[in-house]
Each structure stands twice: as structure tokens, then as C-alpha cells.
Image (cartoon, rainbow, N blue to C red):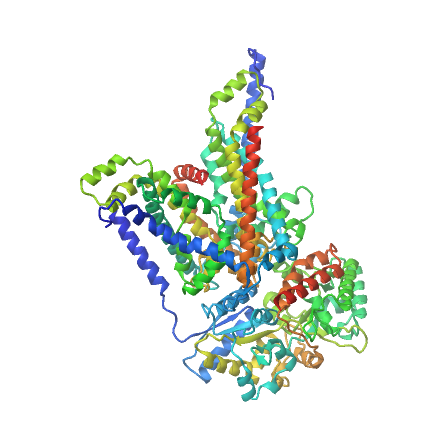
Amino acid sequence: MRKLKVALLFLVALLLLSAVAPVAAQELELWAFVNTHARWFREQAERYAEEINPDFSLNVIEIAYGDLHDRLLISIQSGGVGAPDIADVEQGRFGSFLRGGGDPGFVELNALLDEGGHTENLVAARQALYTSMGSVYGIEHALTPVVLYYRADVWEGAGFDPQEFVTWDDFVDAGRAIVDQNPDVIPLHIHNGLHELLLRQQGHDYFNADGEVTIDSEESIALMDWLLALKDEGVAGDPPEGDALWAAFKDGTLISMVGADWYGGFFKDNAPELSGKWKAAPLPAFEEGGRRTSVWGGTGATVVKTSENVEEALSFLEFSMLSIEGNVRRFELTTLWPPYIPAMDNARLHAADEYFSGQDLGALFADVGPEAPPQWQSPFRSQLNSLLAAVRQDIKDGNRSPADAFAEIADTIRDEMEFES
Amino acid sequence: MFGRGRKIAPYLFISPFFLGYAIFFLYPVIQSLQLSFYRQVGLTNPPRFIGFDNYVRLVTKDALFIKALTNTTYYALGSILIIVPLALLLALILHSPKLRFREFFRFLYFTPNITAGVVVGIIFGLVFEEQYGLINNLLLAPLGLENVRWLREARWIMPAVILLGAWKWTGINAIYFMVGLQNIPPELKEAARVDGATRWQVFWHVTLPLLRPILAFVLTIAIIGSYNLFAEPAILVGMEGGPNNAGMTMTMYLYARGFRELKMGYASAIGYSLAVIILVLSVVQLFLIRAFRED
Amino acid sequence: MRLALSRPSDADERKSLYLKLFEATVVYAILFFFALLVGIPFLYMITGSFKTNGQLFSWPINLLAPEPTLNNYERLLSGEEIPYLRQMINSVVIAVSQSALTLLFASMVGWGFAKYEFRGKTFLTIFLLFTFAIPFQVTLVPLFQMIVRLGLLDNYLGVILPSSVSAFGAFFMRQAMVSIPSELLDAGRIDGASEWGLFWRIGIPLSRGALSILCVLVFLTAWNDYLWPLIVLRTPEKFTYPVGLATLKGLYKIEYGMILGGAFIATLPIVLIFVAGRNQILDNLTIGAVKQ
């Protein structure tokens, strides 16, 4: 029995020891859910330590998208247990921090932005995504202009130049011709954000300026019907996501991608072997003279209220996110087009990009950027996104009509709004 | 340590347990009932009394709750229909006295049961993968069948989870049945044989009725297990249950509302609804078994 | 298949020999088929942990790893994406402490119920049996709020304490201890032993068998648990291994080889325990479970 006692004592000691394990001193923690962001933050932290504060160190932790937002919400609500100092919050999930009360638990940035003279330097439409009742809680990473990425070798090889497409009809005609020659190819990938971003290109959205849900609007339903018709024709398709998606890019099944600036960085990371084969063009418009871009995604950097290093965190964000150097460097590393106006005409944004066949991607983003449509924030967006995620495959497979599915989602959200008011 | 008082000793022995039981079980059970009549979003916001609103909403307005309930019931029925006959078959075979390597088989069949749900979910992500998965490539392709989009098409998700469940639980249930078979006196079967009964008749009229207690046990465990199902589908198709929430179980739904959206009152109401469902099912099952007995 | 019941002739005997051979073949075929169904996913987990993502996602599927790489294990153990070793240690600490506490509480309360008469015993027994039927999901939300208020969020104790009062364990130990002869205790009392001494020197040693079964059951539950640690633990350095492995699954780029390696390492000790004491544990486990 003595052995048992010794073992028990040892256990208790071990337990206590590990329960009070020392925390690394004076280190700031940052959560990110994309490796391109993480990489840039790490580099900025090194520069900050060199130039501003030699004691500064930043622990950049990469957490899965869903996990990050779920865990951040609970950490904030529980008074900061396990919370980071700085967190990337995706605009689609920002709303969930506003529900139930109003105080999202982030440091208000108005003073920093106004006193530092940064407010005019930031694109207002992007900042609106992280603003509630006049308080700004986040700084946007990217303008997120959407362009048409395409496999230059395939399209040009078939005798088409996507740079010259004016309308979606031009794109579809060319896509048809390519599919006629090679039925295995998918010219248009109906990815999870395509409907939303094309809707924005048309000037509509899932929520309107007044915060009302509009996913069941006529335009929204018509757009989805159009995409489904393209899928029936074989011009559009939806290969599985994840590793299988990159396999589809690599084996030449997918030959285009309607994506935002950040997708350029995704290509480089996930399909380095396709370097030199891609180019990008303005989006085809829905009618001649129409808007040639949209916005998709976007992530804001926030400072968590419970942080013990708020001053340092704000200073670091000002250094990295509100400077020309930081914004330019971010574009170089990740192809995120700066939402920071003073950086937009920097020469380094216009370097020839080897991955994109030597193209000046910056010129393209600068060209379409001013046309970027507005996007409306709502506390109910993250819920709408998860409702939509649930029916997306059924819609694409033709098991549910867009009209029916969208109406159901909209009704659920309206009902939820009423329940919480 | 406790002195020699035989009067107080028992109370000292039972008090640590009951203290813990009161704090970590009874109090939460009562607190949860109270909370289920309040609306509280978040941990710090003040709760507001709303009577039966949460329950009314669950039953009349919350399509996702109904879906989670349907999914879980589908899983329970589907897995029972696969597991019980298979487990019984394996038990009958393994019970045969002349069998070689019995211990090996028994151990192997039991192994999935001691594997963590998260690990099982991860492995089966590769088993059900659409293009490079084991089932599509090793089972369906040789039969000339097309790839099934197991985790992407709503209608295939629950069958996939059921197959996973069968993989995990058939072995342990076979072992339960073996225990039941061991408790049947061999004389009974021999007597029936002497009376001219076929093997099938012996099984149907002697073995099966005597296995009824074990069957009741297996069914109870299966029902409770189904309503506890969380890790495997959460890992396999994600916390939202994948396309059309087809893989969303009751416990996952409680987790989603309670610990992802922090709707404390609403999640409590879900917890109590779950409790009622499990209790009702258990009672129904007890009555059914009693009915069989009178039969 | 009607068996020959009347006096068997030679022909009948030969026929039944063939029949037996045929039966044996069918029986072993079924057993091996199920063994394959059970075994192949495990095999794939093990070989997959020695493959790159590219090898896993390519045709044709290979159940073995013809060009094994240790890269996954190197990255896993170096803590590149998650502090895996730390998380394994967390799992050990939590599972062992939870087992020890549960055993202590359960054997004490079991002893009290088995060997003493006291007021309220019947009531408490019925009460315990009654609340036994309430599923744990009911308690999740208030328990979580309590853990937050007590400051036990992201703390091992927050995981361990609520899980270490097991009503099942209490009943289980009572059943095991009730058969200990009371004469032994009376003899001990005459020799001057304290009540605690009787429990510790007679009760515990004589119910070692039951304790070891309960220990395995509790350890297994704690080792494999996902839901409650997921709710309570908030930082990767505190995660148990299932919570840690699950975070890898959601990352933008799923490192399957690493996850499979982590899953393999975590499953290994359990399988080894079972291989070592398989028959006894398996028999007892079943009994324990059937009683449950």
C-alpha cells in the first residue's frame, strides 16, 4: 500500500506542477488562420523588434478557421482565459462577436486610427466590416478585389485571350469551345464563395445596407439558376474541396478560378509546380460597361481587450498594418492588395510576378480596385453562412431549387432576428 | 484516521463522493432546468426569463433540432439493424468450442472499441474519401460500381457514419452475446435436439429467447450510445454535420448552440429535451421487452 | 441443414464429414473476412503515417508503404504544428489522476454502502439509482459556467474533477465489496483497527480485482474522451491528444501523415495493455460492462 501512496503523491505533485506551468514572459500571442498571414506577421515582428522594441517577441499561432473563431469567442466571454493579444478575425465571423450584447471584447481602435491620421488612409468600405455603432474593432488586411485567374497555356492554346473577355457571355462561349475539345476540363469552378461574390459584382449581397437579409432576392436566385445551368452544360463544375481540389488544379481539370487577391498566394503555396502557367484578368462583366470586379473574404486584425499588452499590440499593428512598408511587404509575400491608400501606388507592388507568367498583378488590382462593391456586415452573417454551407451541395446537385433553399435560409434568419430583438 | 466511531464512519466514507456528486452533477442538473427557461447569449450577459419559449421554439421552429433528432434516430436504427445480427452471428461462430484462434479473433474484433473516437473519425476520413478512399477503391471499384460521394452528398453521410459505428461497435456486442451464450445451459439445447428440432429451430426457440436479457442490454447501450455520438461525426464531416447537416447528431447540436454560439439557455433546453427522449425510449423499450415476455 | 438424426449409415457419416469440412471453411472465411474489415483501416493508419500527402492521395491505393518516410514522425515529435508530446503527457496526467480519484471516491462510497448500516442509506441508494438515468448532456452548460466561475477553465482540474464522481463506479464497488466477510472486520476491530484502517487494509486489498477493472474502464474513458476536454481546455499546451489531433484535421492543409502518426502513437499503449492482459481484462471488462 505504501507504493500506492507514493504513486498518488507523485501524481498530485505532477498535477500541481503542470497546472501552474510558467507562461513565457513578455511574449505577445497572435492567432491567424491562414499561413500566408502568419508568415507575414512573423516577418513584421522581427522587423518591429529590430527597429522599435528589441524586447518584443510575437508568438504566431496558426489555428484552423472554425477553431479560431469558436475558441476566441469563448476566451473573450470567459474574461480572457487562453485568449491571444492579437487575433485575425474573418469578416464573415466578425458578426458573431456582436451578438447577445454589443461589446465584442476587442479594443476600440478609433483613437489609434483617428489620432494617427490613419482613418482617411484606409478604404472605408472595408473598415465598415469591423465597425459597430461607430466603434472600429479591426483593421482590414486586404481590399480583396476579385479577378479571373486562368491557365494561360490552356486558354491561349485554345485560341482565346481572357484579357479580352468583356462579358460573362464571352467567357461562357470560350468555355463551351474548350469543353467541346476536351470534356474533362472544367472552365468555371463553382466554389463556395462564387455565388456570393458574383452577387456583389452585380451590386447586391446576402444582407443589404439596412441589415435586412436579402439572400432570397430575385437577383440572388436568378444568379444561382444561371450557375446551375452552366453546370448542366458542363461549362461549370464543382470538384471536391481540400487536397482533391489542388489535385484538380494540378492535373489540369480546373483551368480558371474566380478569386480575390489572396487566392494568388494560395496558388503559390499549394500548387508551386504550376508556376508560370497562370495569369489573371479583370472579371467579365454581367453587361457591357458593368463592374469588372467584386470583393470576397477579408480578415481584420483585432486586439483582444483582456490582453495585458494592449499598448504594445496597438503599436505593433500600427507599425505593420498602417505603414506603407508593412502593406507593400504583405503584397510581396501574400498578394493581398493593400486597403491602405498611401501604399497603393508603391513601385514594389508592380514587380513582375513569376508565378503569374511575369504579369504585373498589382496593376490589375489597382485597375479594378476602385470599382470594388460595398459589402454589408451583420451579426447574423456567420449563422447565414453555416445555414448556406449545409444546403450548398444539395443546390449544386439539383436536389433543391435555389429559390426554395434561399427562402428557407432567409426565413430562418428573419425569425432569429426577431427572437433576439 | 476516522477514529473508532462506527456511527459516523459510514458518513465519512460516503461524503467525498456525495459532495462531488452534489456539486458536479445534482447542482448542474437543477441549474440547467432553471436556465432552460431563460434566454442567455454569452457568459456575461444577463439572463432574461422567457418561460417555455426555448422549448416551444425547439419543437415548432427549429428545423435543425428536428434534423439532429432525425439523424440520431436514423443512426440508432441503422446501426442496430446492422450491428445486432452481425454481432449475433459472430458470437455464435466464436462460441463454438472447437474453434481455433478464438482469442485472437475476439481480441481483434474488440480493438476498434478501445480506439478513441477522434482517431476513428480521422481514419474513416480516408476510408470514405471520394477519390482516393478505401471503400470506393477497394470495395466498390472491383465490383464495377461508381464512386460514392460519401461525405459530400447528404444522403450518404449517415450511411457512412452507420458503417463507422458498425465497425466500432459490432465486436464488443459480439462479446456481450458470447457472455449470454455461455450462460445458456447446454442441456437445454441438447434436449431440444433429442426432441428432433433442427439447428435453426433450436436457435429460434431456445437460444434466442434466452438471449433476451442480453439483447435488452445491447439495445439500451446502443440507444444511449447513439444519443451520445459526438467525436466520430464531428471529425468525419465537421462540427456542423457536413452537407445539409446530415451528420449532425443531438450532442453535436447541443455543442454547436451551447459552446460555439454560447446560447446558454437554449442549449440547456436542448439538454433537457435529450434527457426526456432518452428516458422515454428507455421506458418504451422496457415495456416492449415485458410484452415479449408475456407473449 | 437438417442433421441426420436416425442411426447414421456409412454414407451419412461421409456426408457429414464433408458437411463439417464445408462448415469449417465457411466459418473461417467469415471470421477472416471480418478480421480484414476490422484490420485494414488500422493497417492503413499505420502505413499512412509513413507516407507523404502526395502518396496518400494518388492512384492506385496502396495499403502498404513501399517508400516509407519518417518525416511525419519527425515533424510530429518536434512539435512543429502542435505540441504533440506535451499533449500526450497531458492525456497521461489527466487519465491517471482521473482514474486515481474515481477509484478512491468510488471505493470509499462503495465501502460505506456495503459494510455499514446508517440512516438514509436506502434513500440515498434509490436516489442514486434514480439520477443514474439522467444523461450527462443535461449538465454540460451549467458545469461549464461553474468551471468558468471557479477559474478552472483551461485547467486540468476542470477536466478531472467533474469526471471523477462516477455513480456507476459507486455501484460497481459496492457490489464487489459487499461479499467481503464481516467477520474479518469484527476481528480487526477487536485487534484495535480503526474504521479507516479496516477499509485500507482489508477492503481495498480484497477488492483488487474489481478495482483493476474499474481502473481500466475509467482510464479508457478518460484517455479517449473528446467532448469535455474540448470544452474546458483552451490552449494547445493544455490540450489532451484527441483535442490536439482534431485541430490538425481542420487546418487549411490537412497533414494526414502527421495525424495518422499521432493517432497511431496514441492507440499503441492501449493496445499493448490489452495484448499483455487480454483475456483477463476482456472477460472482466465484459462483466463490468454487462453490469453497467
* A235 displayed left or right of A329: right
Residue nearest the viewer, comparing A231 with B10: B10
* A250 displayed left or right of C221: right
The residue positioned farthest toward the left in the image shown: C191
User: Residue A59 at x, y = what percent?
Assistant: 46, 72
Q: Residue at x 54, y 39 (%)?
A: B219
Q: Residue at x 69, y 80 (%)?
A: A369
Residue B222 sits above or below residue B30 on the image: above
User: Residue C42 at x, y = what percent?
Assistant: 51, 46
Q: Which image quarter: residue A377? A: bottom right
Residue nearest the viewer, comparing A274 with A136: A136
User: Residue C141 at x, y = what percent?
Assistant: 50, 59
Q: Residue at x 45, y 35 (%)?
A: B103
* Quadrant the N terminus of chain C occupies: top right
Residue nearest the viewer, comparing A148 with C58: A148
User: Residue C60 at x, y = what percent?
Assistant: 62, 50
Give the mark count: 0
